[in-house]
Image (cartoon, helix red, strand yellow):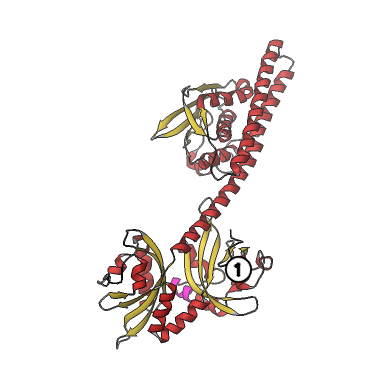
């Protein structure tokens, strides 16, 4: 979608401003190829030196600290999440042209800034029209009628305003409708946009910013909101230099805003798909390793000299069961491949007690070796709609962890149960193992490669996988633990 967009210049960077994506629209607008820009230049190359210097001085004065380098481009973005402003871009051949650029943050899965997205449109034509309209209000009105933009004229003394028929039509009113009561138009601004609108207008009226331009939502006659781009300029002052009149225009940018939202949604979906594929790789390595370990343990026990023929028969049954479960796991992993290529997770109605029982059988080698008491208290009729591969992986990770981190001073015990809480399925897995110091290590509990006990087999991946899978299914995990007493996980499956 990005590559096929030719009307907009779309550029993304990392946190240092190094260009990471450069779409077809950017190539057309700036004259560079993507190969010439990606991983080779920062966005500083597309601005004029004079503009960067001036903007740096403005920001440094505003925030009372020196702002330089790439921070000039993104200081306001970091604070507000995005910034829309007019700029001057430089083409490869050295020519310049005006643009309107919206720069927004790109967030990772932890809601931390990992880069910036530039959405730019060439406004050369609009600026030409704007210059002409300074000379003649008639020509301005004529141009606005042709483009569908609205005209407004604000008396700053009485706070009354005039709006053209295009302006009124934009919000669903006819030309003969009066919208010129003091403050009436401003009262229609969406509450979430009001503060920013008022602040930018006050800064412009005080001469602290060179132009007034603001994007906000306006209430329409049918009680819906529409996005508009609002521009204005002072055209009259009193004898003391105080502004008393402004004129301006506003444009319906709802479609553009929807496109921006769609683009952000697309980027989020791409990121989510990548995370699912990574999660799948973890499932393959971790879950198959669990089966491999179980096979190895059963074979070692089978080979021990003191193993009796009857014990060997029992072990062969365990091996047969482990083999069957391995086949099921591989089948489920095939299902996961399909899941990773789909936006929506494929769910199946699962009998939870049976699924828990099957997981206990998979781990039977370790359970018997360490004489672990496992109590499956899930109601035999309890059913949930879930991804079979994810549920198997979640159960394997939590149960194998409970066995791995058992307390050597007590008989290991594990309890599994499930109940409805506020309409959600909550799976409980409790043990009497070593426990975790949540005050010291709680924020690292689900981190990748984080381990908390001196266990040579610990890799710090199981809980990380489980948490990602639970959250991928729109659930979450709550933990209660006490060192030396054990741990209880409440896993909200939905």
Span highlighted in magenta in the image: 56-64
Whether residue 204 sits left or right of residue 240 in the image: it is right
Callout 1 crowding tier (Cα within 10 Å): few <14, some 14–19, many ≥20 = many
What x and y, as percent, mark residue 349? 51, 30
What x and y, as percent, mark residue 225? 37, 60
Q: Residue furthest bottom?
A: 239
Q: In which quarter of the image is residue 206?
A: bottom left
| Residue at mark 1 | 26
User: Is disc 1 placed on a helix, strand or loop?
Assistant: helix
Residue 62 on the magenta span: yes
Q: Quadrant of residue 234?
A: bottom left
Whether residue 16 sits left or right of residue 211 in the image: it is right
What x and y, as percent, mark residue 43? 59, 69
Q: Do we see residue 258 in this rendering? A: yes
Residue ID at (70%, 20%): 301
Residue ID at (36%, 79%): 247
Comparing 22 with 169, the one in front is 169
Position above or below: 431 against 233: above
Residue ID at (55%, 62%): 116
Comparing 135 with 81, the one in front is 135
Residue ID at (51%, 78%): 125
What x and y, as percent, mark residue 405? 57, 31
């Amino acid at each position: 979608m990005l590559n096929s967009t030719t009307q907009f210049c779309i550029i993304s960077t990392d946190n240092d401003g190094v260009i990471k994506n450069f779409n077809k629209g950017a190539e057309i607008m700036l004259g560079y190829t993507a190969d010439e820009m990606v991983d080779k230049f920062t966005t500083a190359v597309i601005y004029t030196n004079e503009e960067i210097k001036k903007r740096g001085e403005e920001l440094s004065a505003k925030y009372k600290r020196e702002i330089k380098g790439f921070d000039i481009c993104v200081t306001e973005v970091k604070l507000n999440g995005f910034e829309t402003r007019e700029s001057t871009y430089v083409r490869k051949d050295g020519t310049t042209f005006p643009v309107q650029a919206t720069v927004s943050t790109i967030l990772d899965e932890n809601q931390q800034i990992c880069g910036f997205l530039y959405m730019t449109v060439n406004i050369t034509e609009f600026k030409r029209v704007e210059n002409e309209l300074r000379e003649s209000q008639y020509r301005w009105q004529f141009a606005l009628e042709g483009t569908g933009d609205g005209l407004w004229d604000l008396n700053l003394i009485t706070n009354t305003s005039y709006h053209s028929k295009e302006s009124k039509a934009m919000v669903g009113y006819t030309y003969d409708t009066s919208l010129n009561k003091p403050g009436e138009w401003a009262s229609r601004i969406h509450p979430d946009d009001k503060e920013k609108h008022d602040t930018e207008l006050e800064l412009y009226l005080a001469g602290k910013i060179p132009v007034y331009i603001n994007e906000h939502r306006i209430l329409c006659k049918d009680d819906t909101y529409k996005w508009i781009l609002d521009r204005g300029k002072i055209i009259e002052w009193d004898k003391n230099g105080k502004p008393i009149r402004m004129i301006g225009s506003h444009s319906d940018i709802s479609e553009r805003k929807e496109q921006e939202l769609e683009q952000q949604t697309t980027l989020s979906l791409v990121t989510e798909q990548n995370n699912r594929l990574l999660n799948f790789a973890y499932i393959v390595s971790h879950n198959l390793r669990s089966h491999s370990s179980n096979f190895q343990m059963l074979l070692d026990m089978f080979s021990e000299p003191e193993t009796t023929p009857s014990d060997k028969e029992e072990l062969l049954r365990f091996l047969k069961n482990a083999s069957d479960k391995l086949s099921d796991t591989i089948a489920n992993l095939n299902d996961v491949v399909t899941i990773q290529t789909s936006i929506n997770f494929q769910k199946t109605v699962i009998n939870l007690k049976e699924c828990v029982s099957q997981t206990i059988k998979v781990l039977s080698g370790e359970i018997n070796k360490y004489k672990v008491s496992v109590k499956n208290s899930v109601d035999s009729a309890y059913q949930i709609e879930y991804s079979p591969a994810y549920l198997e992986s979640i159960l394997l990770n939590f149960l194998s962890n409970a066995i791995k981190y058992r307390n050597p001073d007590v008989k290991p015990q594990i309890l599994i149960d499930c109940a409805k809480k506020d309409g959600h399925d909550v799976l409980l897995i409790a043990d009497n193992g070593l426990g975790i110091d949540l005050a010291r290590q709680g924020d690292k509990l689900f981190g990748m490669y984080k381990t908390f006990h001196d266990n040579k087999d610990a890799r710090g991946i199981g809980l990380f996988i489980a948490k990602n899978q639970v959250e991928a299914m729109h659930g979450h995990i709550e933990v209660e633990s006490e060192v030396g007493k054990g741990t209880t996980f409440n896993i909200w499956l939905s």
